[in-house]
Image (cartoon, rainbow, N blue to C red):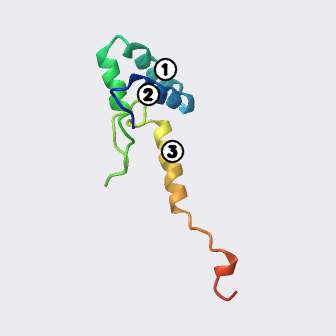
């Protein structure tokens, strides 16, 4: 998801996530990491890891440490994945001209 070698791109991705995250605590957590990332290599590494990709469904569903960001389990990830699964499970409409008997 993010290029750990490009702090500007990573910061932009983090800011975009913060703007769309419904959880105050998660937004604050990411703001704290982002603010510290310029001077603290461990904070920068933590942000890069959290934005290294998206959680994927496995045999047991979604599993990850709880925390803010797309590679952690949180309200934003759960909501997005649920929405994606609902859209994927909806049948596609058959145009009336292709329906049998028309």
Which residue is rendered at x = 53% and y = 32% of the image?
21
Mark earlier in primary sequence (3, 2): 2
Give percent across and percent down for residue 55.
38, 43
Give percent across and percent down for residue 59.
31, 55
Residue on which the image places disc 1:
28
Structural distance between the alpha carbons of marks 1 and 3: 20 Å
Q: Secondary structure at mark 2?
A: helix
Q: Is residue 93 above or below residue 86?
A: below
Mark earlier in primary sequence (1, 3): 1
Along the line of sight, which residue is nearer the eye, 46 or 7? 7
Which residue is rendered at x = 37% and y = 48% of the image?
56
Residue on which the image places disc 3:
80
- Mark 3 touches mark 2? (CB < 8 Å): no
Graded by Cα atoms within 10 Å as few (under 14), some (14 to 19) or many (20 or more), the crowding at tag 2 reads few
Mark earlier in primary sequence (1, 2): 2
Give percent across and percent down for residue 22.
56, 32
Direction from residue 31 to residue 96 in the image, left or right: right
Structural distance between the alpha carbons of marks 1 and 2: 20 Å
Toward which corner of the image does residue 73 lie, by quadrant?
top left
Which residue is rendered at x = 47% and y = 19% of the image?
31
Graded by Cα atoms within 10 Å as few (under 14), some (14 to 19) or many (20 or more), the crowding at tag 1 reads few
Residue 9 is labelled as: 2
Q: Secondary structure at mark 1?
A: helix
Which residue is rendered at x = 39% and y = 38% of the image?
1
């Amino acid at each position: 998801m993010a290029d750990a070698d490009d702090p500007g791109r990573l910061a932009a991705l983090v800011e975009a996530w913060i703007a769309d995250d419904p959880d105050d605590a998660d937004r604050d957590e990411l703001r704290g990491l982002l603010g510290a990332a310029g001077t603290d290599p461990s904070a920068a590494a933590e942000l890069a890891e959290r934005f290294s990709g998206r959680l994927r469904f496995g045999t047991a569903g979604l599993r990850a440490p709880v925390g803010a960001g797309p590679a952690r389990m949180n309200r934003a990830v759960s909501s997005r994945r649920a929405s994606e699964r609902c859209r994927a499970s909806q049948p596609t409409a058959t145009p009336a001209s292709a329906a049998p008997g028309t």
